[in-house]
Image (cartoon, coloured by chain):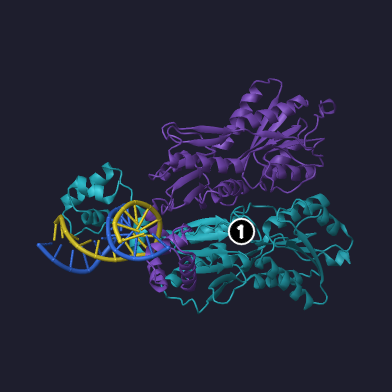
Chain colours: A purple, B cyan, C yellow, D blue
DNA sequence: TTGTATGCGTTATCAG
DNA sequence: CTGATAACGCATACAA
C-alpha cells in the first residue's frame, strides 16, 4: 500500500522506491532494481498518498474554478481553456458551482488541498469569501483593487454590434437584456445606453428577460408586432437570440430581412441555425487559460499581487446572415 | 503561518494551539489561554495546512463528481443534491467535466486529495479510468459488476408516458431521441420500442436529434406536416420538447390539442412555458444525494463493495396541459 | 491545565 | 548505485 511496503517487499530502501516511481532513477538506480520496484508496486497495487506528497512538496497540483452555476456552456468553455493549459502544466482544474446565480453567500466552498482559486463571474461580495490565503484570480468581473483580473472587452463588442446596425441604416433598436445580475451584462447595458445616447437619431427599446427565454415570448411578440417596431435586436446571449428567432417565426418576420438579430458569445457549441447568427464572439476559452496562466504567475512570483494586473481580452463581431440592411424605406 | 508559529508567539505549545483551533479545548485549556491563542492565530492570519491535516487524519473531506459536461442543468441538479448532503457532513463536492460527451478518454482527472469519486452519466469505458483506488459510485449508468450504483427508473417513466398517451387515444406517436450516447437515452429508446411492440395498433416514428434542437426544426416540420402525422411526441429531454413547441408554432398546431407533447427531466429550473409541459420527472437531486450517501457508506464500511449495491430511484409522470386526447376522430 | 513525543507517507539530502 | 535520515504541519495519546 505505502511506498515503505513496496520497499520492504522489493528488498530495497524506501528512498529507492520513491526515486524509481518518480522516474528519477536513470543513472542512480540499476535497471534491474528499478524493474523490481516497478513490478512490486504494480503487484501490491501501490497508490501514492497525495496528502503526504503535497505536504512534502508544498503544493497540491489542484486549482479550484468557482463559477455561479454549472448549467451554462459559457463556464464549460472557461473550464476547458483552463483545463487544457493545466494539463500541460500538471495542474488539475476542478469546478465548484456556487449554485446561487448572483453569488450571495455563504457557500460551502471546499478549501481543501488547493494551490489557487479562479473565480469566474462571481460577484464581488462572494469573491471576498474566496480570499482564503491562496492565490486568487478573478475573471469576467469588475476588477477589484489588489486582485489580478482578466476580463473581456464587452463594451467594445457591444459598440461594434451597434455600429454595424447603425451603418446598415437601423434606427429602431431593441436590446434584450439578461435578467441575471452580473458584471458582464451590466457592462452590455451600460455601453448600449451610452452608444445610443451619442446617436440621437436612434430609438432604443429595452427588454429584460430571464435567462431561459421561454417566458420572453409574449413580451417579445408585443414589442415586435407594433407598427414602429424595432428593425434590429441585440441580445445579451445567443440563447436569447434563439428566443427572438422563435418569436420571428410566430410573427412571420424573416430574420436577416425584416428583422436583424445580433447575439453575444458565439460559442462553437451553439447549434447551427438558419440564418446563421451574427454574434459578438467572447473568448471564453482564452479567458480560462489566461486566468490560469495569471494564477501560475502569481504563485511563482512572476506577477506581483500588489501589481493587481488586469488583462482585457479583445472581442470580435462575427458577421453572418442574421443582419441585413434596415427595411426602413418601406416601414417609414 | 503554521500552528507552530502561532504557538511560539502565543507562548504555548503547538498541541494547545491545535486543541483550541479545533474547538476541543473546553475543560482542557483555560479560557484565557484559549483566547490568547485565537487572537494570535487571527493576528498572524494563520491558515491551516490541509495537506498536513489530511495526512494526519487519513481523509481529505473532498469528493469528486465526474460528469460528461458542465453545460447541462441536469448535472447542476446532481451536484446540488450531493453538495447539500455533503455540507451537512463536512464534505465538499467538487466537479470535474470530462469535456467529451460520450466519455472516450483519457482525461486529466485530478486524483489529488480525494476521499472518493462519484461518476455521473459517465460511459463504462471512462469509468474504468476512475478506478484509482478510491471509493467509487456510479450514477445514471448501466450498473457494472462490483461497483455500487444508483440509477433512476427511466424505463418506468417512459412506460407511464406512453400509457398516458395511449389511454388518451393516441395511436401515432413520435419519439424524438437525443443524439448523445448515454445509458439514460438508450434506456428510453429501448423501453419505447418495447412498449410500442406490445401495442400493435400504435404506429411509432423515431427521430434522432442533436441536443441543442435548432437543427431539428426542419426534420420535425417534415414529420409533423405529413397527413398521417403523429398526434403525440415523447422527447428525451425538456429542451428538445421546447424545439417541438417551436415547430408547432411554425405549423400552426396547438400543443395540447392538435399535438400532445411529453418531455423528460422536469427540472424546476426549466422556464415556464405555455401550455405547461407534461414531463417525466427525473429526481436528479436525490440521485446526487443518494450517490454521496452510498459513497459515504462505502467509505465507512457500512456498505460492502462486493455487495455492489444498485439502487433505483422512482420516476413520476407529471401531467400538465401539453397533453390532451388524440384528435383522432377528425384526422382519420 | 499544559507540554512532550510520536507518526501520518512522502521527497530530498547526504553519506556510504 | 543504495540506504539512513530529516523534515513537511498537524492531531492526539500520554506525561507532567
SS under mark 1 = loop
Above or below, comparing residue A265 to residue A160 in the picture? below
Looking at the figure, which quarter contains the C terminus of chain B?
bottom right
Q: Mark 1 lies on which chain?
A: B
Residue occupying the point 38% across, 62% down: A15
Horizontally, is A215 left or right of B313 in the view? right
Q: In which quarter of the image is residue B310?
A: bottom right
**Image spot of residue B170 (x, y percent):** 79, 68
Q: Quadrant of residue A285?
A: top right
Residue occupying the point 68% across, 21% down: A199
Work out whether residue A6 or residue B234 is closer to the camera in this orientation and state it. A6
Q: How many marks?
A: 1
**Circle 1 sits on which residue?**
B68
Work out whether residue B190 or residue B33 is closer to the camera in this orientation and state it. B33
**Image spot of residue B296 (x, y percent):** 44, 68
Horizontally, is A67 left or right of A280 in the view? left
**Image spot of residue B4 (x, y percent):** 25, 50
Horizontally, is A37 left or right of B67 in the view? left
Residue A18 in view here:
yes
Above or below, comparing residue A150 to residue B144 in the picture? above
Residue occupying the point 23% across, 53% down: B17
Above or below, comparing residue B110 to residue B146 in the picture? above
Residue B27 in view here:
no
Work out whether residue A328 or residue A11 is closer to the camera in this orientation and state it. A11
Amino acid at each position: 500500500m505505502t511506498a515503505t511496503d513496496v520497499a520492504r517487499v522489493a528488498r530495497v530502501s524506501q528512498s529507492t522506491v520513491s526515486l524509481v516511481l518518480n522516474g528519477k532513477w536513470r543513472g542512480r538506480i540499476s535497471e534491474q532494481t528499478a524493474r523490481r520496484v516497478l513490478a512490486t508496486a504494480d503487484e501490491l497495487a501501490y497508490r501514492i498518498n497525495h496528502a503526504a506528497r503535497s505536504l512534502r512538496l508544498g503544493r497540491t497540483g489542484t486549482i479550484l474554478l468557482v463559477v455561479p452555476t454549472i448549467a451554462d456552456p459559457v463556464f464549460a468553455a472557461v473550464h476547458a481553456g483552463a483545463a487544457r493549459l493545466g494539463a500541460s502544466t500538471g495542474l488539475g482544474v476542478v469546478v465548484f458551482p456556487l449554485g446561487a446565480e448572483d453569488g450571495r453567500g455563504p457557500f460551502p466552498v471546499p478549501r481543501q488541498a488547493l494551490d489557487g482559486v479562479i473565480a469566474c463571474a462571481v460577484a464581488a461580495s462572494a469573491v471576498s469569501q474566496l480570499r482564503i490565503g491562496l492565490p486568487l484570480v478573478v475573471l469576467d468581473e469588475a476588477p477589484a483593487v489588489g486582485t489580478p483580473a482578466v476580463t473581456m472587452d464587452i463594451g467594445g463588442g457591444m459598440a461594434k454590434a451597434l455600429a454595424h446596425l447603425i451603418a446598415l441604416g437601423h434606427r429602431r433598436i431593441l436590446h434584450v437584456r439578461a435578467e441575471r445580475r452580473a458584471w458582464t451584462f451590466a457592462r452590455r447595458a451600460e455601453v448600449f445606453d451610452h452608444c445610443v445616447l451619442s446617436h440621437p437619431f436612434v430609438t432604443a427599446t429595452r427588454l429584460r428577460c430571464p435567462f431561459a427565454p421561454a417566458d420572453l415570448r409574449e413580451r417579445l411578440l408585443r414589442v415586435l408586432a407594433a407598427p414602429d417596431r424595432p428593425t434590429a435586436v441585440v441580445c445579451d446571449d445567443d440563447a436569447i437570440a434563439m428566443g427572438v428567432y422563435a418569436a420571428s417565426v410566430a410573427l412571420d418576420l424573416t430574420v436577416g430581412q425584416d428583422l436583424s438579430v445580433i447575439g453575444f458569445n458565439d460559442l462553437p457549441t451553439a447549434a447551427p441555425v438558419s440564418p446563421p447568427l451574427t454574434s459578438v464572439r467572447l473568448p471564453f476559452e482564452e479567458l480560462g487559460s489566461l486566468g490560469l496562466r495569471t494564477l501560475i504567475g502569481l504563485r511563482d512570483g512572476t506577477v506581483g499581487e500588489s501589481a493587481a494586473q488586469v488583462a482585457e481580452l479583445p472581442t470580435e463581431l462575427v458577421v453572418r446572415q442574421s443582419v441585413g440592411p434596415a427595411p426602413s424605406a418601406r416601414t417609414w
